[in-house]
Image (tube, rainbow, N blue to C red):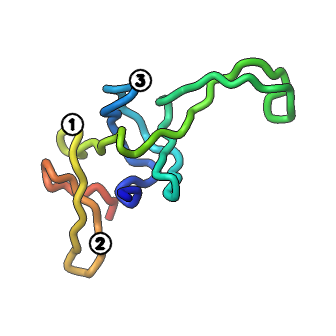
């Protein structure tokens, strides 16, 4: 499973599904299911009863999880979708990098 390639606050591009072509930021990763929640993407309407969280109730928009196979990282240098690889730095740390430009995705 490639869920280790995606982390919270990563910029991603949707390559398949109803929101194909949109960009967003990962807000939550669900690694055991291989799914992520992306802000502003895969919005569904949920009917909720009045509660403490939603005092008025009604129909509210909710971001739903989507499979990681429908996402691609955005290259930090060029801003276009890219694949992700792993490499080790001189100090022994394992980091992610964009395969198109070779730019590091992980913050140092």
> In the image, is residue 60 above or below residue 66?
above
Write the residue at 77% across / 26% down. Answer: 48
Specify the quadrant that holds the N terminus. Answer: bottom left
Identify the residue position indicated by label 3 in the image.
18
Q: Is residue 59 left or right of residue 73?
A: right
Return the residue nearer the eye: 10 or 16.
16
Q: Residue at x 62, y 29 (%)?
A: 62
Q: Give left or right: position of 9 versus 63.
A: left
* Residue 19, position as x, y percentages in the image: 40, 25
List the residue tagged with mark 2: 94
Q: Quadrant of residue 47?
A: top right
Q: Secondary structure at mark 2?
A: strand
Asked whether 79 or 60 is in front, the reply is 60
Mark 1 highlights which residue? 80
The percent position of residue 54, horizontal first and vertical second, equals 80, 29
Residue reaching furthest to the left: 101
Q: Which mark is residue 101?
A: none
Distance from the alpha carbon under mark 1 to that under mark 3: 19 Å
**Label located before the other in sequence (3 or 2):** 3
- Residue that protrudes farthest toward the bottom in the picture: 91
């Amino acid at each position: 499973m490639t869920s280790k390639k995606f982390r919270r606050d990563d910029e991603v591009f949707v390559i398949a599904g109803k929101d194909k072509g949109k960009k967003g930021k990962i807000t939550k990763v669900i690694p055991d299911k291989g799914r992520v929640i992306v802000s502003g993407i895969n919005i569904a309407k949920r009917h909720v009863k009045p509660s403490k969280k939603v005092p008025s109730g009604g129909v509210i928009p909710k971001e739903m999880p989507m499979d990681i196979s429908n996402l691609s990282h955005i290259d930090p240098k060029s801003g276009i979708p890219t694949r992700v690889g792993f490499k080790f730095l001189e100090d022994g740390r394992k980091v992610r990098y964009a395969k198109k430009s070779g730019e590091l995705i992980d913050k140092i």
